[in-house]
């Protein structure tokens, strides 16, 4: 079928909306008509060339929609099902899935290769070339054809336009606070960077009962925005926050520090550890250039002050259980998904949306599709 999508033709090139040929679903796959696509910073990393990627790249890895066609042997979905896409497929059989860690399933090693899990071919082509969908999803298109392991069935009484946020940013941030950092009641938590991931880390820390949720972000607009999600304090930099945090905690410093900046710099790790208390935890929930192979860190602080550094993929969450749980909270009025969306864009405005993100003027941009986008 003919459709369209935002394509990046090479490192540093802008997104270009092109006509696409979308293949029919083969065994194990479904085609989904999307309602929206979240604009995550990870797509900007790929566009900018910060991480290796096959090109042409079809952007987007956050999306929600309705199953429109089902290939042979699909067992978990049928036409008409509402779904949220997930960028980590889960086989259910590898060591990690068996341990309950489907967010680090072995199939995740294939998501940046661009070829379909089902048969090792390209499902989407542009100008006669195979297009590599971001995370094998490519949600910067009104239609996606994906493996059933990357589509989670959800309740059909939630707005799909907001459900797309659960594909990555919501769970990565919320889980980084509630699962990886394991925030507890009365703790002091610092969230460094209040974008799409950081705002959800703030909300997760607040829901977990943190006494103080301190946001560090250079954009002044984030002071008021972050307080909508439970932030109690705001500072423009880690250096500016250091002494006030020491005073607020009577010298103890933060129990948990969650680093959710848009682009990790080597010096940030030690800066975050400076804010972390003895016996505290610092969570690395952000990306930088894949070429970074050294960071600033004082090992003495780990061995003698018992500080910990923890990594995270998808906030340590299980897509098939945690996405429905967050949507249950949303339906009960306990998760503000709408407030996460600072501005909506047409697909043709995707470059403008990312310019706004880099300028720090939004928490999360969203591409909303309408009837004019569909075949």
Image (cartoon, rainbow, N blue to C red):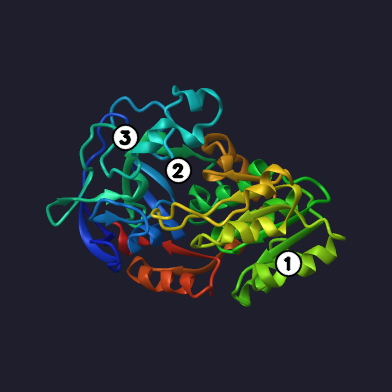
Along the viewing direction, whichever of 161 and 259 lies nearer the viewer: 259
Q: Which mark is residue 180?
A: none
Write down the quadrant of residue 120 in the picture: top left
Mark 2 lies on residue: 86
Q: Quadrant of the C terminus?
A: bottom left
The spot of residue 86 in percent (x, y) is 45, 43
Q: State the residue at coordinates (41%, 58%).
A: 289
| Crowd class of label 3 (few under 14; some 14 to 19; many from 20; radius 10 Å) | many
User: Given this view, does label 3 or label 2 mark the residue nearer the observer?
Assistant: 2
The spot of residue 159 in percent (x, y) is 53, 53
Along the viewing direction, whichever of 38 and 31 lies nearer the viewer: 38
Earlier-in-chain disc, 3 versus 2: 3
The spot of residue 104 in percent (x, y) is 48, 35
Q: State the residue at coordinates (52%, 43%).
A: 313
Asked if the residue at tag 1 contacts the one at tag 2, i.e. Cβ–Cβ closer than 8 Å, the answer is no
Earlier-in-chain disc, 3 versus 1: 3
Q: Which mark is residue 29?
A: 3
Distance of label 3 from label 2 (alpha carbons) = 14 Å
User: Given this view, does label 3 or label 1 mark the residue nearer the observer?
Assistant: 1
Q: State the residue at coordinates (23%, 43%).
A: 123
Write down the quadrant of residue 369 in the picture: bottom left
Could you tell me which secondary element the residue under label 2 belongs to?
loop
Asked if the residue at tag 2 contacts the one at tag 3, i.e. Cβ–Cβ closer than 8 Å, the answer is no
Residue 39 visible in rendering = no
Along the viewing direction, whichever of 249 and 181 lies nearer the viewer: 249
Q: Which mark is residue 242?
A: 1
| Crowd class of label 2 (few under 14; some 14 to 19; many from 20; radius 10 Å) | many
Q: Is residue 79 left or right of residue 115?
A: right
Could you tell me which secondary element the residue under label 3 belongs to?
strand
Establish if 175 lies above or below 252.
above
């Amino acid at each position: 079928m003919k459709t369209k999508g935002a394509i990046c033709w090479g490192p540093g090139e802008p997104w270009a909306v092109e006509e696409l040929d979308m293949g029919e679903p083969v065994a194990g796959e479904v085609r989904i008509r999307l309602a929206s696509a979240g604009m995550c910073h990870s797509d900007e990393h790929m566009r900018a060339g910060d991480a290796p990627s096959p090109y042409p790249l079809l952007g987007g890895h956050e999306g929600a929609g309705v199953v429109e066609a089902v290939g042979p042997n699909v067992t978990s979905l049928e036409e008409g099902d509402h779904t949220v896409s997930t960028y980590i497929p889960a086989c259910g059989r590898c060591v990690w899935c068996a341990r309950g860690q489907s967010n680090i399933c072995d199939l995740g090693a294939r998501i940046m290769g661009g070829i379909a899990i089902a048969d090792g071919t390209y499902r989407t082509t542009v100008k006669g070339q195979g297009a590599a969908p971001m995370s094998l999803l490519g949600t910067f298109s009104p239609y996606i054809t994906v493996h059933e392991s990357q589509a989670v069935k959800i309740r059909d009484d939630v707005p799909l336009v907001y459900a797309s946020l659960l594909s990555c940013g919501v769970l990565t941030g919320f889980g980084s606070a509630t699962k990886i950092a394991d925030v507890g009641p009365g703790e002091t938590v610092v969230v460094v960077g209040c974008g799409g991931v950081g705002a959800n880390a703030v909300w997760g820390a607040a829901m977990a009962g943190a006494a103080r949720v301190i946001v560090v972000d250079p954009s002044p607009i984030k002071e008021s925005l972050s307080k909508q999600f439970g932030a109690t304090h705001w500072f423009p930099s880690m250096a500016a926050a250091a002494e006030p945090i020491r005073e607020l905690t009577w010298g103890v410093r933060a129990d948990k520090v969650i680093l959710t900046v848009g682009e990790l710099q080597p010096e940030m790790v030690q800066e975050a550890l400076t804010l972390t208390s003895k016996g505290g935890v610092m969570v690395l929930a952000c990306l930088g250039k894949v070429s970074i192979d050294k960071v600033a860190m004082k090992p003495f602080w780990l061995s003698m002050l018992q500080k910990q550094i923890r990594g995270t993929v998808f906030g340590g969450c299980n897509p098939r259980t945690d996405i429905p749980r967050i949507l249950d909270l949303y339906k009960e009025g306990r998760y503000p998904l709408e407030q996460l969306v600072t501005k909506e864009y047409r697909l043709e405005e995707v470059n403008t949306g990312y310019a706004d993100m880099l300028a720090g003027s939004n928490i999360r941009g969203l591409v909303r599709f309408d009837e004019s986008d569909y075949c």
